[in-house]
Image: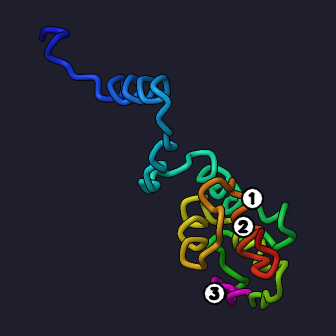
Amino acid sequence: MEPEAFHDSFREKVEARVKAKASGETVEKAEPAAEPTGAVDLMEALRASVERARSPKDTGDKATSPGSRAAGGKKAPAAKKRARSGPAAMGRELMALTKAELYEKAAAAGIPGRSSMNHDQLAQALSHPGRRK
């Protein structure tokens, strides 16, 4: 292909802005950035995966494999889950989500400034709805 066959619309927009500014016209700010495409933040996905895969030794739970058997060959009874409640538990649950999942929750909750927040800031804003900035 010939280089002349390509059209550089970005350059044209920049040149038009420069000419407008040079002639004394008021130049408005650029268009806002496009909405997120739902692309996955790999570091956040990795962090969430590591949190879910932490060994029982790290969490203080007893280590059991899914197919472990109690004495006599019977399946061991399922361990009772501790009920989690309160802001601390909600914060832990939010931290386990990916940034994309947090962003969706923040959008649903109407949290302002969410597009410029990182994972931890989104989780904090969602766990403390009364302290939004």
Number of marks? 3
> Dot 1 lies on which element?
helix
Q: Residues within 10 Å of mark 1 (few under 14, many from 20)?
A: some
| For residue 61, side relative to residue 11 (left or right) | right
Q: Which residue is mark 1?
A: 120
In the image, which residues are magenta?
A: 72-79
User: Image point 71% across, 82% down: which residue?
Assistant: 70
Q: Which residue is mark 3?
A: 74
In the rendered image of this protein, does residue 24 appear above or below residue 91?
above
Instruction: For marks 1 and 2, give the CA distance.
Output: 5 Å
Q: Amino acid at mark 1?
A: Asp
Question: Do residues under tags 1 and 2 come within 8 Å of each other at their CB atoms?
Answer: yes
As drawn, the residue found furthest toward the front would be 24
User: Image point 79% across, 87% down: which residue?
Assistant: 84
Q: Residues within 10 Å of mark 3 (few under 14, many from 20)?
A: few
| For residue 80, side relative to residue 103 (left or right) | right
Instruction: For marks 2 and 3, give the CA distance.
Output: 42 Å
From the top left corner, tell me how far across and down residue 100 is, in percent.
54, 60
Instruction: For marks 3 and 1, give the CA distance.
Output: 44 Å
Q: Nearer the viewer, mark 3 or mark 1?
A: 1
From the top left corner, tell me how far across and down residue 94 is, in percent.
70, 71
| Among the 4 quarters of the image, the one containing residue 62 | bottom right
From the top left corner, tell me how far across and down residue 112 is, in percent.
65, 68
Depth order, front residue of 55/22: 22
User: Image point 49% across, 43% down: which residue?
Assistant: 28
Depth order, front residue of 78/133: 133
Which quarter shows the C terminus?
Answer: bottom right
Q: Residues within 10 Å of mark 2 (few under 14, many from 20)?
A: many
Q: Amino acid at mark 3?
A: Lys
Q: Is residue 39 magenta?
A: no
Q: Amino acid at mark 2?
A: Ala
User: Image point 84% across, 78% down: which residue?
Assistant: 88
